[in-house]
Amino acid sequence: MPHLPFPRSPLSAPARRGRTHRRRHAVLSAVAVAGLLGGALAGSATAAEARAADGPELVSNGDFSAGTTGWWWTENSPGSIADGRLCADVPAGTANPWDAILGQNGLPLTTGESYTLRYTATATAPLTIRANVQMATDPYTAELSAADPVGATAETFEHVFTAKADHTAAQLAFQVGGGEGGYTFCVDDVSLTGGAEPPVYEPDTGSPVRVNQVGYLTGGPKTGTFVTESTEPQTWVLKDGAGTERARGRTSPAGVDSTSRQNVHTFDFTSVTKAGDGYTVSIGEETSEPFTIGDDLYSDLRGDALAYFYHNRSGIEIDADLVGEEYARPAGHIGVAPNQGDTDVPCQAGDCDYRLDVSGGWYDAGDHGKYVVNGGISVAQVMAAYERTLHTEGADGTALGDGKLRVPERGNSVPDVLDEARWQLDFLMRMQVPEGEPLAGMVHHKIHDRAWTGLPLLPSADPQPRELHPPTTAATLNVAATAAQCARLFKAYDAEFAAKCLKTARSAWAAAKAHPDVLADPNDGVGGGAYPDTDVRDEFYWAAAELFVTTGEDTFRQAVLDSPLHGDTDAVFPRGGLSWGATAGLGALSLATVPNELTGSQLSSVRAMVLEAADGYAADSRNSAYGVPYAPEDDAYVWGSNSQVLNNMVVLATAHDLTGETGYRDAVLHGMEYLLGRNPLNQSYITGYGERDSHNQHHRFWAHQLDASLPNPAPGSVAGGPNVGIEDPVAQDKLKGCAPAMCYIDDIESWATNEITINWNAPLAWVASYLDDLGGGNPGGENPGGDEVCEVTYHSYRWNSGFTSQVTLKNTGRSAVSPWELKWSFADDQRVTQAWSAKVTQTGRDVVARPESWNTTLAPGATVNFGFNGTASGSPADPRAFTLGGKSCGVAP
């Protein structure tokens, strides 16, 4: 939920406003309003004089020749004249920029007119100040709010803005607090003139040759996009790091890409498999960013994407030994002043009469809130990244094991990824309403500050009271689902904790069934996001699925099968992607991949949904000039669109795990190309990866853009990405009229396009783990880690109500299989009537093919062919999932 903090008066605390958005929440400080932060330009005297001539000078005594006449300051930082400048001694202990201000009132502004603010400033300690032109009274709406880095060397800053309202007496306010210690700030040559034309923002997109700026797997696809006005094929040249030509070819014109409004070509160099660094693609005079071809591209990203969660833990000191001095920080919200802590938190006034210890967990996003519906999908996908390694051939859990990740619990004989998940699970279970209270077993929707805080602000410096918000059905089902998943994964490591998780899951499920329509208030968006959700059928489906997988109990099986969503692919897997508000797909993925008690036909039905969804996402990737597996209706890229891309990639990767079909794998790899630079902005959206990476994401304490003493986001942090809504003032100022896939700016105050969150980094961690497994020698979809692996070619010839199917089974493993036994399930009413070269039996929809006496043994690399006739009605579908000896087979196209 964006908000705008402004000083109520020169001597008072800041005021804050809130607004709600369903997709995400964020917090906006005063810098955001005009969207010009960090854009300070040193203008020449000649240029300034020309602009000044376009309108009158509005600031009086801007050169301080009349002393301090016309200027005011906050009482903690009295102003005086020194060497012809206005200077203020700012004491230590100011937490926020608005805690110390110098300013001037009485500035007239006219709607639609453009103005230029220009000034020169120094500070005895480096800090980022805020230069605001705003209303002089509540609500202090700003026409300009700029963040400028000031240091010992005098620097001139210039900002141009257009007034959006008439003001008879606006205010110029230099907000100069928030530095680490005491310091002296000085300003001179302050000028505000009218009539200047605002500059038109043009994003720096670099080279028109767009590639994955990290690189390409040796055995995977290698494609790129070229932005050009030409409609004729162009010659591309691939060179290695030494400048030696390795390949060349011709581009394929793709026309105007609707998401970017760019005329583009594509090019393909998949045939190049020689590993190396420093590759580039050149087309004419244009050359791409450098990249690598190799198989060890994503091991660092796997670890970095998961380290994001430790970085954002609440209630624990972040250890420099694990993350480095730059990212170390004190524990937040543990009740040490100025914190009021999360160990004894009351409800909002009138909501309950008890208090809860809700310490721990992960801070959700740019703010210090903790939200169950965001935390639920996040911890589910973190655990799923590990659970995949337990049941997928070729998936390697070693990199997630004990001693491998940046967590303080390493060395406890528990996989580090589960240690990280437990930090969040403990918090989620603490949010449950205690026994004996009204709504016992339900779960509070969120806990956060009573009012919005500004940024930058370390969690340990947050002074706001913390409050529990009312329980909701959605939050309760999130806990039921994740606690059930917890129960099966922790059983081997901590049986007592696993039992606690299962007990919590059962009680949460019972409470949700008893209270199925307790919904979040969409207006509860002050101090934190509202996260309203008017349809919780998806949460019921997800929770029932996880409870069934864990317990095998028929009650939960029936809840899955009786759900109105079951079997409806578009309802379970929306084309726009899974999200905190669309979670049914999480349950379907667990049912499809984790061993459970579904019948063969029931399992086939679930897997058919996964594959149908993946087919749609793969088609979107093939149809995109940038290869992105994301095609929202009307190209309406949403808030957090990169997370939607990633969640679609999770479904595609799961389909590849189930079938071995390389088309699914390729769509995942093309999605990563998009995220790492093959996109309309030539922007890597993942910090620390690629030559042109996002590094100013919206975050309270990774806020280097606002405070030079604070770091940029840690490597492996994914930015939200293009958002046609452009809800924040920075985006509105800079991106008006943007093409959908170009509605993004790497600016800390653009919370609508550049936020980072746990539920966006969770699918990144899952996908990075999958990709690292591919790079570990499994890019083609085969499963070298098993003794019995296979590939199936299945073709059917249909007529009226009959069909003939031909099947080829190949042993792609390293050991002979004898006797072989191939299993699959039909998704419809197909019936086998006659078979040859194999004994084919059918029970319900489940089918088993066994050898004849003369083809019992299937040697490594050998094939066996068989066929059968059958009957069917309607338009029957060929099966897509096969197992040989209980292990998944790949399916040839």
Image (cartoon, rainbow, N blue to C red):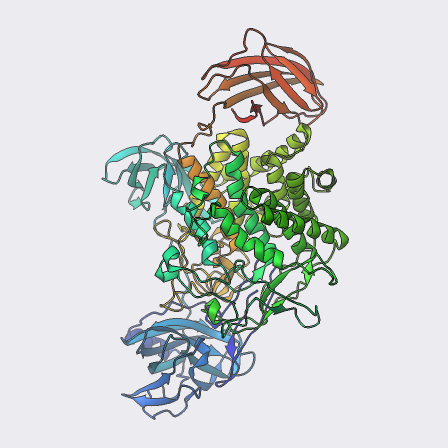
Comparing 691 with 654, the one in front is 654
Left or right relative to 527: residue 774 = left
Measured as percent of width and height from the top left, residue 366 is found at 50, 62
Comparing 394 with 278, the one in front is 394
Q: Is residue 702 above or below residue 235?
A: below
Measured as percent of width and height from the top left, residue 307 is found at 44, 52
Q: Is residue 433 above or below residue 622?
A: below
Q: Quadrant of the N terminus?
A: bottom right
Q: Quadrant of residue 52?
A: bottom left
Measured as percent of width and height from the top left, residue 224 is found at 39, 40
Measured as percent of width and height from the top left, residue 706 is found at 40, 68
Is residue 602 visible in the rendered image? The answer is: yes
Residue found 60% across the figure and 68% down from its top: 344
The residue sitting at the right extreme is: 514
Left or right relative to 428: residue 817 = left
Is residue 764 visible in the rendered image? The answer is: no
